Image: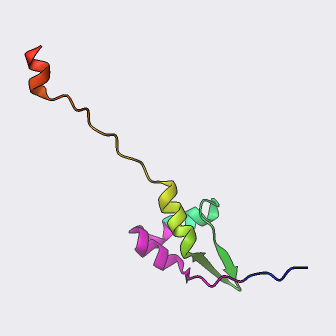
Amino acid sequence: MPARKIVREALLTVEEVAEWLNVKPRFVRRLIAERRIDFRHIGAFVRVPESAVLAFIEAGAVDAIPRRSTTRRARDAS
């Protein structure tokens, strides 16, 4: 059986995640309860991997729509 590779990564508290996302801790707890963000139970504590927060932010990213190149003058001239 191959050995499992352990990756060391920052585990954040609910309060730290809330501060990072600029939301209240209740919102982070709701994300955890709804399984919308990855988390770990460590004894009685709940921790969120830093990569899970980054993935949550990336999943909510919306790309900007480029503006049309036509200008008002071009439309007025026609």
Q: Quadrant of the C terminus?
A: top left
Q: Is residue 72 above or below residue 14?
A: above
**What is the tally of numbered marks visible in this picture?**
0
Among the 4 quarters of the image, the one containing residue 19: bottom left
The percent position of residue 5, horizontal first and vertical second, equals 74, 82
Name the residue rendered at 34%, 40% in the picture.
Answer: 65
Image: 29 above or below 70 = below
In the image: residue 64, left or right of residue 38: left
**Image location (x, y in percent) of residue 62:** 42, 48
Q: Which residues are magenta?
A: 6-26
Residue positioned 54% across, 80% down in the render: 12
Q: Residue at x 47, y 54 (%)?
A: 60
The answer to which quarter of the image holds residue 9 is bottom right
Between residues 69 and 44, which one lies in front from this camera angle?
Answer: 69
Q: Is residue 9 left or right of residue 6?
A: left
Q: Spot the residue most to the right.
A: 1
Q: Position of residue 4 (x, y in %)?
A: 79, 81
Quadrant for the N terminus, please. bottom right
The colour style of the image is rainbow
Q: Is residue 71 magenta?
A: no
The quadrant where residue 73 appears: top left
Tell whether position 11 is magenta: yes
x, y percent for residue 48? 58, 75
Q: Could you tell me which residue is drawn at 54 percent across and 63 percent down?
A: 55
Asked whether, in this view, residue 50 is left or right of residue 77, the answer is right
